[in-house]
Amino acid sequence: MVTGGSGLVGKGIQAALANGRCGETPANEKWVYLSSKEADLRDRRKHRPTHVIHLAAMVGGLFKNMSHKVEFWQQNVAINDNVMHWAKEYKSNESYAYAKRMIDVLNRCYNEEYGCNFTSARRHAASTPLRQFIFNEDLGALMVWTLRNYDSPEPIILSVGEEDEVTIRDAALAVVSGMGYTGEVVFDTTKSDGQHKKTASNAKLMALHPEFQFTPFKQAVKQTCEWFKANYDTARK
């Protein structure tokens, strides 16, 4: 079962399976894609899944996140809690430890949105705004591979390599090129860039799945822009 199945990554999983990037689907596999309109994540009795790829979330852009921090935190923790509640439990101090760590995040959210004078420790790092972008179909294929082949509770990062980081500026210009736009492009430097660097290592993934080939960034952007233009009238906006 895929929660958030109608979103970008959920559609990537569907495309990866349909395009044969995940190999032949075993006869005992049945994929169910759920959206918030189709399922209550608190009720598992309808489908009784044996495996769950959990993508459902309350999402929004940078500025919506900045202005509704408490709501985003509360809603997404509630969604995750509903899913994890129905999963098999295992004994660990991690639940306590992570809950304690998350209070620092919640403290900051309450301070910035409501002015509550809680205390939180922070560190800052100034660097060039860089991001690692992954094609949704690549991510879909990797999620299916993980479901079928990765049997460990330890996290695994599904990402392009550190060497494939792209600046936000270059990403925007790639979209401009992919859309065939020839007008002026203005970068509003008065607005926040968000976090400057979020580098993640995919060394563990590549050690376990070395044959996987990522779609090159510019090719992925071009395909995405072509899909957008072809489906603009019917795509979710």
Image: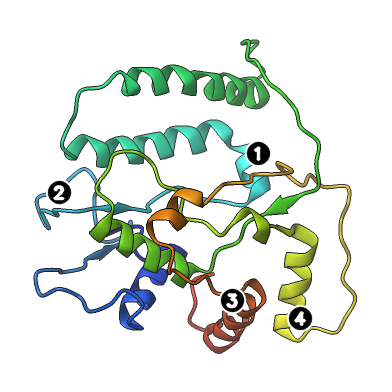
Q: Where is residue 11, by image quadrant?
A: bottom left
**Contact (CB < 8 A) between labels 2 and 1?**
no
* Dot 4 alpha-carbon crowd within 10 angstroms: few under 14, some 14 to 19, many 20 or more: some
Q: To which residue does mark 3 refer?
A: 220
Residue 137 image point, x, y percent: 45, 72
Does dot 3 land on a helix, a strand or a loop? Answer: helix
Earlier residue among tags 4 and 3: 4
4 vs 3, front mark: 3
Residue 66 tag number = 1
Q: At label 4, which amino acid type do we have?
A: Ser
Residue 126 image point, x, y percent: 81, 36
Q: To which residue does mark 2 refer?
A: 44
Does dot 1 land on a helix, a strand or a loop? Answer: helix
Relative to 7, residue 124 above or below:
above
Q: Is residue 7 visible?
A: no
Q: Is residue 121 visible?
A: yes
Marks 4 and 2 sit apart, C-alpha to C-alpha, by 45 Å
Marks 4 and 1 sit apart, C-alpha to C-alpha, by 29 Å
Marks 2 and 1 sit apart, C-alpha to C-alpha, by 33 Å
Marks 2 and 3 sit apart, C-alpha to C-alpha, by 35 Å
* Dot 1 alpha-carbon crowd within 10 angstroms: few under 14, some 14 to 19, many 20 or more: some
**Contact (CB < 8 A) between labels 4 and 3?**
no
Q: At label 3, which amino acid type do we have?
A: Ala
Residue 177 tag number = 4
